């Protein structure tokens, strides 16, 4: 699964990553600065120790201990051979040997000589004739470990807090998945609730809303089943009664009416399943003229009721036969109801256009994303619901419904691609 770069978890992860980078950058800068300060302090103390040694002939060990320096038992040659050199200056070298720090002063150069560029002032050189190199050992404990421990503890706290935030946001991820499942039709969900924070409260309200929706959906389904059952019984009795009548034109008309009513019940059931998301499209290729014939049969009208152009094009479309016929039937029904002349059907290679003569639809009613609007909510004309159903069916097929008014004609175009 690809990571959404705009998700809260991604943004929080980036934020904590930047915090860790900033903290460790500051640690590295502090560490470098501390090392320079430490080396400068060592050099100053080593220089004072050298002066004490060269200017006092008596016991100078107490003064050296105050500087936290002592004379080492190793010879300069031994240290230079076996120890690791840490820093080299024109006036001396600092070595590390078995975790201990040693200093050996270099032979003072004879002037003239170039002055080195350092971050701290150089001590004045000892007199050349008094130089006697000895090995000095630094007894002062190094405190770099304290800085490492402090910044390590800060990093650990940041990581622990990051883990705590992720744990707190985990229910939000489960809630998102539950909403996705709900949008796909699964209303019997129960997202687990952990804690008493805002996310837990949202999860509780979500579960409560799902219970109400599931209850309402079951009640609606039960109501529709009962209505369809109660209507289907008298329709079937009427149809059987019509079959028992003497064959005549009136009998055929009555039979067609009952067949029409029976089909409408099936259409209501189909639309209920479609609107509740329980209808899966059964896509197959059909000739448009066959769909048109079926839509006319539903309307109890003939194709001669329309002026058809392009019928010979042999247009084939990949649709669900029943649903697409319902959408087409609604457009044809509106064209017949609200046209002052015979409506026209134009069949093209990538579109079907149904036009009728009449006044243009108000601007507010040219959007078919909702069943009704305030202008037509109390209207007895029925305009609005059929267009909404047609728009919904075509949108599920990936087909667009467009409207325009031209030369006094209301035209609804089904754009196939």
Image (cartoon, rainbow, N blue to C red):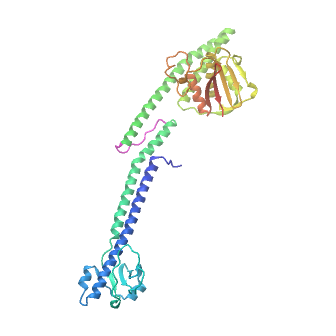
Residue furthest out toward the right: 312
Q: Is residue 116 above or below residue 145?
A: below
85 to the left or right of 241: left
Where in the figure is residue 91, as x and y percent of width and height? 38, 82
Q: Position of residue 339 (x, y in %)?
A: 63, 16
Query: Residue 249 or 363: which is nearer the viewer?
Result: 363
- Residue 273 lies, in percent from the top left, at 55, 29
Side (left or right) of 281 relative to 202: right
What secondary structure characterizes most of the magenta part? Answer: loop
Queried whether the magenta region covers residue 193, the answer comes back as yes
x 45%, y 44%: residue: 174
Quadrant position of the C terminus in the picture: top right
Instruction: Give the image quarter of residue 329.
Output: top right
Does the image show residue 138? Answer: no
Nearest the eye: 51 or 224: 51
Left or right of residue 21, residue 254 in this image: right
Q: Residue 215: x and y, percent?
A: 44, 30
Please say whether residue 50 is one of the residues in the magenta stretch: no
Range shown magenta: 186-197
Name which quarter of the figure residue 344 lies in.
top right
Q: Nearer the viewer, residue 407 or 78?
A: 407
Which sits in the foreground, 24 or 4? 24
| Image position of 220 with respect to 67: above or below | above
Instruction: Please tell me which residue is depicted at 45% across the width and 53% down the height of the picture.
Output: 14
All told, the count of numbered labels is 0
Asked if residue 292 shows in the view, the reply is yes
């Amino acid at each position: 699964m690809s990571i959404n770069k705009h998700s809260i978890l991604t943004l929080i992860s980036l934020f904590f990553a930047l915090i860790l980078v900033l903290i460790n950058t500051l640690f590295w800068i502090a560490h470098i600065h501390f090392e320079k300060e430490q080396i400068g302090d060592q050099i100053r103390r080593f220089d004072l120790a050298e002066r004490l040694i060269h200017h006092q002939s008596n016991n100078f060990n107490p003064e050296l201990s105050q500087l936290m320096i002592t004379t080492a038992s190793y010879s300069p040659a031994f240290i230079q051979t076996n120890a690791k050199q840490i820093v080299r200056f024109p006036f001396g070298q600092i070595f590390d040997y078995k975790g201990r720090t040693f200093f050996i002063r270099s032979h003072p150069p004879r002037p003239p000589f170039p002055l080195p560029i350092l971050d701290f002032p150089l001590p004045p050189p000892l007199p050349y004739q008094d130089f006697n190199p000895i090995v000095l050992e630094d007894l002062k404990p190094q405190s770099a470990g304290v800085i490492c421990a402090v910044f390590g503890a800060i990093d650990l706290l940041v990581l622990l807090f990051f883990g705590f935030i992720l744990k707190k946001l985990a229910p939000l991820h489960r809630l998102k998945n539950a909403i996705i499942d709900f949008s796909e039709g699964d209303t019997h969900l129960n997202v687990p609730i952990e804690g008493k924070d805002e996310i837990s409260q949202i999860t509780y309200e979500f579960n409560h809303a799902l219970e109400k929706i599931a209850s309402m959906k079951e009640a609606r389904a039960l109501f529709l089943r009962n209505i369809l059952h109660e209507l289907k019984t008298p329709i079937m009795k009427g149809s059987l009664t019509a079959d028992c009548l003497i064959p005549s034109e009136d009998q055929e008309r009555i039979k067609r009416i009952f067949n029409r009513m029976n089909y409408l019940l099936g259409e209501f059931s189909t639309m209920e399943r479609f609107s509740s998301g329980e209808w899966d499209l059964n896509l197959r290729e059909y000739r448009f003229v066959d769909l048109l014939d079926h839509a006319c049969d539903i309307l109890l009208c003939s194709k001669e009721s329309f002026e058809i152009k392009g019928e010979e094009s042999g247009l084939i479309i990949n649709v669900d036969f029943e649903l697409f016929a319902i959408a087409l039937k609604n457009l044809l029904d509106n064209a017949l109801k609200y046209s002052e002349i015979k409506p026209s059907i134009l069949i093209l290679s990538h579109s079907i256009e149904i036009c009728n003569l009449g006044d243009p639809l108000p601007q507010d009613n040219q959007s078919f994303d909702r069943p009704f609007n305030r202008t037509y909510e109390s209207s007895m004309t029925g305009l609005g619901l059929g267009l909404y159903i047609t728009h919904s069916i075509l949108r599920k097929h990936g087909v667009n419904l467009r409207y325009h008014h031209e030369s006094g004609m209301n035209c609804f175009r089904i754009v196939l691609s």
